[in-house]
Amino acid sequence: MSESKQVAKHPVPRPALTAWKKVHGFALGLPGAFEDHPWGETVAKVNKKVFVFLGVTDGSYPLGMTLKLTGEEAHAHAMTMPGAEPAGYGLGKAGWVRLPLAVEGAPRADLLCDWVEESYRAVATRKLIAELDARH
């Protein structure tokens, strides 16, 4: 029996992967944050709650991320990004937005990090938020 190599269906452009890596590192640097892999994708959690879905980087699915943006301004801004859409499985109704990274005009990594912090603040405890605020 020969093993076949799986071919990536969605090539990952270098700038998109660079942005993904920056956001991934930022998310895991937040107080109490940790990485998990439910459903085979990378997520960042705090208090056992997901605050950013980071998807997969192997090309099996388009590179992107999903965040919870409860602030009206941030949510509206995110929804203007190319390819942005409310998250599936009913999460969109709670402010979750899916953002593709491998599209022309995708959000810059620094803006994504701002949105990751907002998503983190939506689920983190007051104590962890105070710890984050003390860093600034």
Image (tube, rainbow, N blue to C red):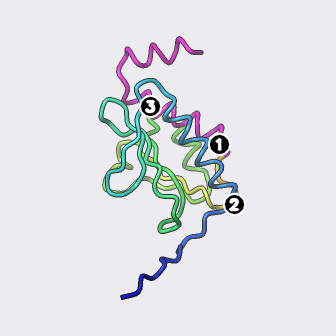
Q: Which range is magenta?
A: 108-136
Amino acid tagged 1: Ala
Q: Main secondary structure of the magenta part?
A: helix
Mark closer to the chain start, 1 or 2: 2
| Residue positioned 49% across, 27% down in the render | 30
| Residue positioned 45% across, 13% down in the render | 130
Work out whether residue 45 or residue 122 is closer to the camera in this orientation and state it.
45
* Cα distance in 3D space between marks 1 and 3: 16 Å
Mark 1 element type: helix
Residue 136 location (% of width, % of height): 60, 15
Judging by the rendered image, the residue that carries numbered circle 1 is 109
Work out whether residue 117 or residue 89 is closer to the camera in this orientation and state it.
117
Q: Outermost residue, front direction?
A: 1
Residue 112 sits above or below residue 135 on the image = below
Judging by the rendered image, the residue that carries numbered circle 2 is 104
Residue 33 sits above or below residue 98 on the image = above
